[in-house]
């Protein structure tokens, strides 16, 4: 179960890690005392920026958008049924859904969290 959550929400971790490494490298660059150290650190910063750019570009690809939509569709349908049919219209529809297991709630939470994380990564593009 945790591996599914890791796959779905995994994008934010690498971007945050790379951003942290870039910040650490810039601090090390400021402290570097020789040109060799500065050149090495500048190379590392360029490589980290390239990795970050690839992650962000990949997150915005059309294929990823289609897969995200397909993965989210069952969650949207389930939440719509729970909130609208069972709760909002329940007095007229006698809507009832069996209790959902903890694993299913984790998947639902991960899918919803992914959309918020995707929005954050989209802001990195700007």
Image (tube, grey):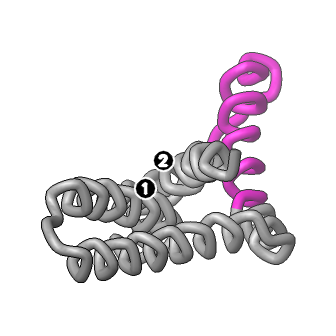
What residue is shown at x 31% (from left), y 54% (from top)? 23
Is 17 left, or right, of 110 in this rendering? left
The quadrant holding residue 13 is bottom left
Which contiguous range is marked in magenta? 72-99
Q: Secondary structure at mark 2?
A: loop
- Residue 58, magenta (yes or no): no
Indicate whether 94 appears above or below 49: above
- The picture places residue 115, in percent across and down from the top left corner, at 63, 49
Residue 106, disc: 1
Q: 4 or 41: nearer the eye?
A: 41
Q: Secondary structure at mark 1?
A: helix
Name the residue tied to disc 2: 99
What residue is shown at x 46% (from left), y 58% (from top)? 12
- The picture places residue 85, in percent across and down from the top left corner, at 77, 32
Question: Counting other residues with Cα less than 10 Å from the Cα at mark 1, is it few (<14), some (14-19), or many (20 or more)?
Answer: some
Task: Name the outermost residue toward the front.
Answer: 35
For the image shown, how many numbered marks are present on the structure? 2
- The picture places residue 118, in percent across and down from the top left corner, at 63, 52
Indicate whether 1 appears above or below 84: below
Indicate whether 125 appears above or below 54: above
- The picture places residue 18, in percent across and down from the top left corner, at 39, 65
Q: 66 or 124: nearer the eye?
A: 124
Is 62 left, or right, of 112 in this rendering? right
What residue is shown at x 81% (from left), y 20% (from top)? 92
Indicate whether 43 appears above or below 28: below
Does the rendering let one see residue 112? no
Quarter of the rendering occupied by the C terminus:
top right
The quadrant holding residue 93 is top right
Question: Counting other residues with Cα less than 10 Å from the Cα at mark 2, is it few (<14), some (14-19), or many (20 or more)?
Answer: few
């Amino acid at each position: 179960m945790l591996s599914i959550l890791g796959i779905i929400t995994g994008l934010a971790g690498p971007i945050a890690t790379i951003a942290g490494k870039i910040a650490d490298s810039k601090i090390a660059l400021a402290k570097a005392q020789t040109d060799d150290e500065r050149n090495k650190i500048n190379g590392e910063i360029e490589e980290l920026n390239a990795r970050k750019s690839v992650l962000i570009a990949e997150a915005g690809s059309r294929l990823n958008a289609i897969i995200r939509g397909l993965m989210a569709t069952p969650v949207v349908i389930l939440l719509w049924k729970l909130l609208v049919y069972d709760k909002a219209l329940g007095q007229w529809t006698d809507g009832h859904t069996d209790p959902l297991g903890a694993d299913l709630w984790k998947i639902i939470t991960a899918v919803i969290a992914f959309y918020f994380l995707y929005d954050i990564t989209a802001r990195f593009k700007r």
